[in-house]
Amino acid sequence: MTTISETNDIPSYAPFRANMAQAGKPVFRVGILTGPGFVPMDMVGVQTVFSLAPGAELHFLWKNQELVEGFPGWWTKPSTTFSDCPESLDVLAVGMHPPEVQNDLEVIDFIRDLARRSRYVVGVCNGVALLGAAGLIHGKTVASNFAAEALLHDLGASAVLPSGGGVAVDGNLFTAGPGIGSFEVSLRVIEAAFGREMAEFAEFAIEYDPHPPYGKATVDKADQAVVGQCRELLSSIVELYRRTPVDGAVPSK
């Protein structure tokens, strides 16, 4: 009987992992903020796409290594503490977290500092607001959640792409909306880091080819009653993000 070790060294996956690691290639370090209440769909694409990158080394970052509950019911064990995080990263990725995390000054300081030592900074959905709280979107064009536009402008963004507008690339800042945005923004970073051929390989390897069954997933296509309902559901959360003073968002340097 085949047994699986505690390190998840699964024999059947070994040849695939070895091929993707490409011995001799530099390590490609990816850090994913993974705190209590994080929204898994915002990071699934990040984990999936970057795990295909040559030399990929993924770090699920939090203050400690205790289990955290992704919202809702997606339990995850952070792999790397803030204090043990590598000195620099190739990619720092932040998805939506609750206001309790975004407004945590320890988290804000950590993200601000680490972003300055990362080649690429990725924000998905309201993770872009956390980047804003850290002063990382001043004067930038960003994409995010449809309900966060006013908040992001208050945090210093110069422009916010409309719902369904795709990935925003501004310098080394790559941002996108929720869900499939995590795949699309990651593929764009793969292209920037490794070239178009590698990005196309990754896109095909995961067969990324969305087919929305109803075609109602953007503000301009959805029933406006549904848009209003969703705005109402999100409004109280968006307002709680403002508990971190907008004026305290320090511009990145």
Image (cartoon, helix red, strand yellow):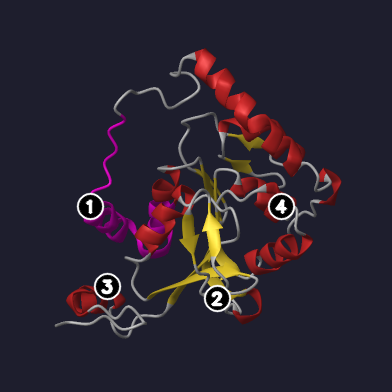
Q: Quadrant of the C terminus?
A: bottom right
Q: Position of residue 17 (x, y in %)?
A: 26, 75
Looking at marks 4 and 3 on the same chain, the residue that comes earlier in the sequence is marked by 3
Q: Between marks 3 and 1, how big is the CA–CA gap? A: 14 Å
Q: Main secondary structure of the magenta part?
A: helix
Residue 80 position, x and y percent, is 55, 76
Residue 33, can we see it?
Answer: no
Indicate which label's residue lies in the foreground, 4 or 1. Answer: 4
Q: Amino acid at mark 1?
A: Phe
Q: Position of residue 5 (x, y in %)?
A: 31, 84
Between circles 4 and 3, the one closer to the viewer is 4
Alpha-carbon distance for marks 4 and 1? 38 Å
- For image coordinates 65% across by 68% down, the residue present is 114
In this picture, which residue range is highlighted in magenta?
186-212
Residue plotted at (56% across, 26% down):
230
Q: Earlier in the sequence, mark 1 or mark 2?
A: 2
The mark nearer the N terminus, 4 or 1, is: 4
Q: Magenta stretch: residue 208 in it?
A: yes
Q: Which mark is residue 20?
A: 3
| Type of amino acid at the residue the image marks with label 3 | Met
Q: Give the image quarter of residue 193.
A: bottom left
Secondary structure found at label 2:
strand
